Image (cartoon, rainbow, N blue to C red):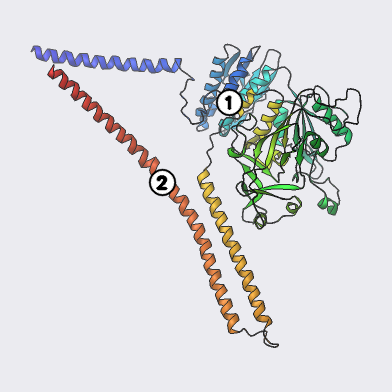
Amino acid sequence: MDKKNDSASRRLLTGANLIVLALLFIAAVLLSGLLFRGARLDLTENRLYTLSDGTQNIIDGIDEPIHLYYFYSQTTARAVPGLDTYAKRVRELLEEVAARSRGKVILETVDPLPFSEAEDRAAGYGLTAVPIGASGDSLYFGLAGTNATDGQASIPIFQPDKETFLEYDVAKLISSLASDKRPVVGILSSLDMGPGFDAQTRSVRNGWVIDDQLRQLFEVRKIDPSIGMIDDDVDLLVLVHPKNLSDDALYAIDQFVLRGGRLMVFVDPDAEADVPAPGTDPTTAMMQSRASDLSKLFQAWGVRYDPSRVVLDANLALHTQSSADARPARHLAVLGLRQDQLNQGDVISAQLETVNLSTSGYFTLNDDATTHLEALAQSSENASTVAADRLRFLTDPSTLFDDFTPTGERYVLAARLTGPLRTAFPDRSEDGHLSESKVDANIVLFADTDLLNDRLWVQVQNFFGQRIYNAFANNGDLVINAVDNLIGSSDLIAVRTRATSARPFTTVDELKRRADDRFRSKEQDLQTELTQTEQKLQALQSGKGEGSEAILSEAQRAEIERFRNEKLRVRKELRQVRRQLDADIEALGARLKFINIIGVPLLVTLLAVGLAGWRGRQRRLRQQQRRDA
């Protein structure tokens, strides 16, 4: 009887222990959810979910409190699948920013219910209202911020497909509120980059995305080309496609740099955005040069730049389509630069993944130059140059391969120029004239203006009246990095240049490139054999007598038959090259599937079995030791 009572007591005690453990587990989960909200262990390769040092520096630099208002229509958002997950990600980031600010950033989460004062506040801050469902209830999902001086900034709507830019957007908003005065960026350009009125379509034209981004971050001031002096309050002067500048304008730029002003230059041997003015004679427009140069200033700075030469690169060539019905072909002058071509030791270009250029020139330095030229972007060694005029009327980009011969040189496509400078106008003597620089110059040079154009790096969509930008390359990041660095701000760079979650299939791209080269080689062989056969046919035909032009000799028939067979053979080889490409890619995919589906689970299983076996042996060993004792 006692044994039965003891057994019942043990069962009761075991059941009570399990209940207590379950309650403790639930309490621990609830408590950890409250205490560790927003905490995370970031195991991603590029630490995508860790607050960057740049954001922390921006937060540390806040002098006056900043209020952030996170608007999220929680009830309305239930009709949008998956939005709650991203909204939680945004809230956790904002909470972490507020927690690390030590009270400098005050966060308030607002659920703007329909027809409420909170909804009016959201609309007043300029947040985007997205109608959802048949009822048309408005969904707000954005951020507004204010500072102690009544300054205001906002993110109209958070886009789930722009998650990689989330921290940068928040850091940019806080940075704009933390400073009362925005840096002044003066732009002198012969290209129409900003918004305006299009006379041909008689409608308002949106500006380039890069122009819009610059205006969001800085005070942009348009500089007249006829100006005789650059104001001292201009923190950075940007020259875009400077064409036909007068000596007075060049002198103003010269003296601005010698006074210590920062300069960024975009020149181009063939600027595709340089279109003739409306009403220009077509013949004149066709022959009009699209090159730009700063020859007088470059010469004084020790920089060599040839506005008549364009860099070609077989390793970096991108596929382009000359017309809607044409097959995409690799264009040697349209380049997609990767990290290997971007200087990872300079904050301007470090950690950027892709920069696209088109018909770019290149820079070198004179042997007797007093300045230092540090490359920010370079071509590969499989590169050469071609006359810019050849690209003006190019219809088939594949013809650039015909006489392409790599030089083995890595051409400098963008660079930082530093060091002491001398004036390019030693004969002038205006008041305040400087013959040499007060401090070492800091100039950033780009040999391409097309990298600023939307088509090379960003897609623009209209989303409920808002222009939504989806960048597929880092051209904008490169330019904004350069501006931030030249005006002395590097904190936003640390946020912006973080790696994105996009992981290109570089191995597949390399397989395609090699197969494309083999395919083109076969095509050239076919064309060579065709030409040789035609010459032989002409030689045979010329040896026939008069009156027998319509009769083919046995030799001609044999030659024609041989050519047909050879043509079929080469075409078969072309198809084989394409099939081999598909086979290589499929084999790579099969190996990856095997690793992911079988290899990794098998490895984990073997580790688990091994661990279980080791623990069993340890347990038996301890039991044996107790028995021996």
**Residue 266 versus residue 539: which sits nearer the camera?**
539
525 to 16, vertically: above or below = below
> Which residue is tagged 2?
591
Residue drawn where x is 53% and y is 26% of the image: 87
Sort mark 1 into few (<14), some (14-19) or many (20+) by Cα contacts within 10 Å: many
Give the residue type at disc 1. Glu
Q: What element carries label 1?
A: helix
User: Seen in the image, is 241 located left or right of residue 375?
Assistant: right
**Residue 112 versus residue 232: which sits nearer the camera?**
232
Q: Can you give x and y, in whole percent of width and height, for residue 37 in the image? A: 47, 18
**Residue 135 visible in image:** no
> Which residue is tagged 1?
167
Location of the C terminus (image quadrant): top left
Q: Can you give x and y, in whole percent of width and height, for residue 559 in the image? A: 58, 77
Counting the numbered discs, the total is: 2
Residue furthest to the front: 368
325 to 591, vertically: above or below = below
**Residue 303 versus residue 114: which sits nearer the camera?**
303
Question: CA gap, disc 1 to disc 2?
Answer: 36 Å
User: Seen in the image, is 326 located left or right of residue 250?
Assistant: left
User: Seen in the image, is 535 located left or right of residue 601?
Assistant: right
Give the residue type at disc 2. Arg
